Amino acid sequence: MEQQTTLFVVVDPNDDRHVALERALTTARMRLPQPRLAVFVAVDGEAVDTRAVNDHLFRDESWFREQIREPIAAAGLECQITVCWSSDWQAAILQESKRCNAEMIYLPVHAKTSRRFTFAESKWHVLKTARCPVVLIRPGAKARRKVVLATVNYQAQTQEQRQLNRQITERAKYIAGHYDAELHLVNAYLDSMLYPDRGALAKLADKTGVPTHRIHVKQGYTSDVVEDVAREIDADLVVMGTLNQYGATGSLLRGNTAERVIGQLDVDVMVCNQFTSTEVKAG
């Protein structure tokens, strides 16, 4: 029997709805064995008003009982609740999720206020440095897990990029298998000379087990292609990856392509990291 895993769920007490917890409760019911929940209660100081005048920052025992313990108990799930007082919100998430050996992190994001979606640096830091996949939970997104779309790069030139491709497809297959979901792959290309031949597609289909009619290869910018295909197949979850790269000054590179893809989607997005060999050697 498969070993029970842990979902690490971030809850911000400043929010009226806890979309990450709601999604975790829904998706956990679909899995056997059901995962345990590690609920991490903390305030993102970059995203909310942390002054004492903000009444949402004052939570008593009844709030914890009604908002967290009772819904989890009603779902029949095991849980552990951790309350964090650290101002270093992102580092605390990374440290605690590693300590509890989380399978993945459920991180809530707020609804887009414009066409251009932006991340606070704290959330981007979690995305780019987490050692397990991070699932960005969108308010209003479908809770079901029946269609999974994995973004891959057939034109990968480096070892790190090829490893990231494998990691994305393996994680997407794992998720699709758990939820008996339909798995699709998508690849965007700008130069028509880079379009993969039929032999390459057949090889990929054989290697991944994804039939060729579910492998979508389209010309255009990655963000536009992924958005179009996700809408076309009615995807519930998009699985993508980032390379954990650092600039010359030692600062973490945000990754324009990844940011655009995330920004143009209205569904939940799972982000997998592939750390560069230089970063891994650096510790």
Image: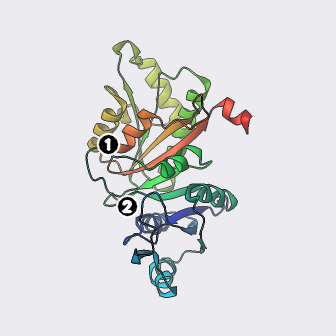
Residue 33 occupies which quadrant of the picture? bottom right
Badge 1 amino acid:
Gln
| Front position in the image: 237 or 147 | 237
Give the mark, 2 or 1, whose residue is nearer the N terminus. 2
Q: Is residue 215 visible?
A: yes
Instruction: Look at the image and tell me in which quarter the N terminus lies.
Output: bottom right
Badge 2 amino acid:
Ala
| Front position in the image: 241 or 143 | 241
- Residue 158 percent location from the top left of the image: 58, 22
Which residue is under mark 2? 143
Residue 264: which disc? 1
Q: 91 left or right of 26? A: right
Residue 262 occupies which quadrant of the picture? top left
Label 2 crowd (10 A; few <14 / some 14-19 / many >=20): many
- Residue 125 percent location from the top left of the image: 54, 47
- Residue 23 percent location from the top left of the image: 43, 64
